[in-house]
Amino acid sequence: MRSKFFDVTKFLFLAVMFLLPVFIGGNGGSSLFPSAAAALSTENGVLTSNLFVEIAKKQNPSVVNVSVKTRVRKPGPSDRKSRPPDPFRDFYDRFFGDRNNQRPRGGMGSGFIIDQEGYILTNYHVVEGSGEIQVLLEDDKEYAATLVGADSKTDIALIKIEKKPGDKTFPVVKLGNSDNLEVGEWVVAIGNPFGLSHTVTVGVVSAKGRSIGQGPYDEFIQTDASINPGNSGGPLINIKGEVVGINTLIISGNSGGNVGIGFAIPINIAKGILKDLKEKGAVTRGWLGVMIQKITPELQESFGLKHSEGALVGDVIPGGPASAAGIKRGDVIVKFDGQNVKTMDVLPKVVAQAIPNKVVEVEVIREGKSKIINVKIEVLKDAEKVQVAQKNKLGIQVQDITPELAKSLKLDSAEGVLVSDVTAGEPAAEKGLRRGDVISEINKKPVRNMSDYNQLVGSLNQEDTVLLLVRRGATTIYIAIKLG
């Protein structure tokens, strides 16, 4: 009798813990309905409906299947090994590298309709290089879509379908405010994983503002709601029934499937570039013209900084806005246009939002003293890459060796590049490369500065073996690193 009572008590406790977020409506706000409690109904003590069921019913019609036929380039020398067509190869190549550089003949993803004009948000990588785009709705109506605009830097694309005779309205989603999301909040993912149309999964927000090395504008929502190949471009929905993210990528196990770690682009990022995508087909961003890097404990000590906040200027692009204004290598940018720059990752995002031709105040720390510099922001052109010293194929971060650095680190020469960060588990770390090492050669070609380094590393292929000549203290050693 006692054990039965314990089982009942445990069941009631778990039921209360599960239903509590439903009753409170998330963030204390209103839910999809006048009252979240109204979304629950019982019959003879049995739960017959819940909020997730109602969200699925309401939002499924506005989620679409996006399929593409890509333009296949002429196979090159690395395409000798044949492979069968794979509709999910785009997804795997995105995270594990294109094994033989041959583009797939078809791809599949998800998207969602945002207005009655037929505009649909999805991922850039879903429609990248597409020749034809087909959109399939839940009611099996199929539409030919046109690519309106795309932004590879945020992995967002806008496509459009036209109403057919007899169509009155499109089912549309409501866009929410991703800034209001809380860690631990319930979310729903809807998409077409592995071609399984309108699959609904539920989880929570695991983290916010994740930077995972995909680009300078990383700011992902992490969730444990199941996301798999084919979910890309689908909506992440809060319990108010609002889209708060665009499901984009996963960290997968050996099977390539979901292991409980997925990422979504915050919907506020999409809302911020939507007008540009509609009107111009591309995004206009501000450009500062600096290469920046993270301030490590060693660099903080070397530069005599009081704290590690800010973005260290590793290089200034000649002829760029920063160069014209007087920003110098070794400056630490701590504030841009009134916004604090606490970490390196913040600067590219706030610069991108700056209006071109606007003069902004940039606060830097130079030789321990604060200095305000007025900079006229320019337009970031497609040919200009955002200059961020990010971790690359080797899994390291490097920088030029200034005379000051050479002196403080007691280096014999300022030639080469200094390894300022090494990621655990990446190829370079596994072969013993360390912070403070100086790379003098790559594949027996001299590395005098960041320009040489970027050129040589940029030419590396995913499966190459890289030979580094490394100066470590008074000794010189070779380190061979197998990529991939």
Image (cartoon, helix red, strand yellow):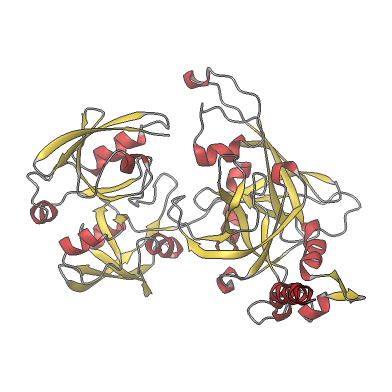
Left or right: 450 in relation to 106: left
Left or right: 439 in relation to 241: left
- Image point (68%, 53%), residue name: 234
- Image point (52%, 53%), residue name: 154
Residue 63 in which image quadrant: bottom right
Q: Position of residue 420 (x, y in %)?
A: 25, 51
Left or right: 150 in relation to 304: right
Q: Nearer the viewer, residue 157 or 384?
A: 157
Please state the total of marks drawn on the protein image: 0
Q: Position of residue 110 (x, y in %)?
A: 69, 49
Q: Position of residue 212 (x, y in %)?
A: 46, 53
Q: Quadrant of the N terminus?
A: bottom right
Q: Position of residue 86 (x, y in %)?
A: 65, 31
- Image point (49%, 56%), residue name: 284
Residue 349 in which image quadrant: bottom left
- Image point (25%, 54%), residue name: 314
Q: Is residue 268 visible?
A: no
Q: Quadrant of the C terminus?
A: top left
Work out which residue is located at the far front of the displayed protein and give it: 1
Residue 132 in which image quadrant: top right
- On screen, residue 308 above or below 80: below
- On screen, residue 272 above or below 371: above
Q: Is residue 341 visible?
A: yes
Q: Nearer the viewer, residue 31 or 357?
A: 31
